[in-house]
Amino acid sequence: MADDVEFLPGEGPSNGISVTLTAGTLQAIRERVGRRGVSAYLERAAQRQIERDNLDELIADFEEIHGPADPEAVAVKRARLTGRTSDTGAAA
């Protein structure tokens, strides 16, 4: 694989690496996906983490420009997204 080629997460050829996991984590993964599904499971988990990291960076950039989000407005929007009633007095 050429080092100067850039791929988005989930794209490009597969490469083998060595990953060290605790026994409990590996056991939990294997119970979910079996022995042959570990690599695919870790690939999807890594992609989700990259998405979360990107979202965290986006939120930090937004807050740097606009300040922190209003907790009441967030509660209202969360309620609309989840279909629950907004209860701004309760912990989210």
Image (cartoon, helix red, strand yellow):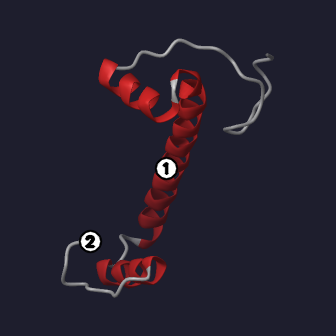
Q: Position of residue 49 (x, y in %)?
A: 49, 42
- Number of the front mark, 2 or 1: 2
Quadrant of the snapshot with the C terminus: bottom left
Q: CA distance from mark 2 to mark 1?
A: 19 Å
Structural crowding at the residue carrying mark 1, measured as other residues with C-alpha within 10 Å and reported as few (<14), some (14–19) or many (≥20): few
Q: Position of residue 58 (x, y in %)?
A: 52, 57
* Label at residue 82: none
The answer to whether residue 74 is above or below residue 45 is below
**Is 63 situated left or right of 10 in this image?**
left
The answer to whether residue 2 is above or below residue 29 is above
* Label at residue 92: 2
Q: Residue at x 45, y 27 (%)?
A: 30
The answer to whether residue 53 is above or below residue 10 is below
Structural crowding at the residue carrying mark 2, measured as other residues with C-alpha within 10 Å and reported as few (<14), some (14–19) or many (≥20): few
**Is 28 situated left or right of 49 in this image?**
left
Q: Nearer the viewer, residue 17 or 33?
A: 33
In which quarter of the view is residue 43 placed?
Answer: top right
Q: Amino acid at mark 1?
A: Arg
Q: Residue at x 25, y 84 (%)?
A: 88
For the view shown, which residue lies furthest in the top direction? 18
Give the structural element (helix, strand or loop) at label 2. Answer: loop
Quadrant of the snapshot with the N terminus: top right
Q: Nearer the viewer, residue 53 or 65?
A: 53
Q: Amino acid at mark 2?
A: Ala
* Label at residue 52: 1
Q: Earlier in the sequence, mark 2 or mark 1?
A: 1
Q: Position of residue 4 (x, y in %)?
A: 78, 23
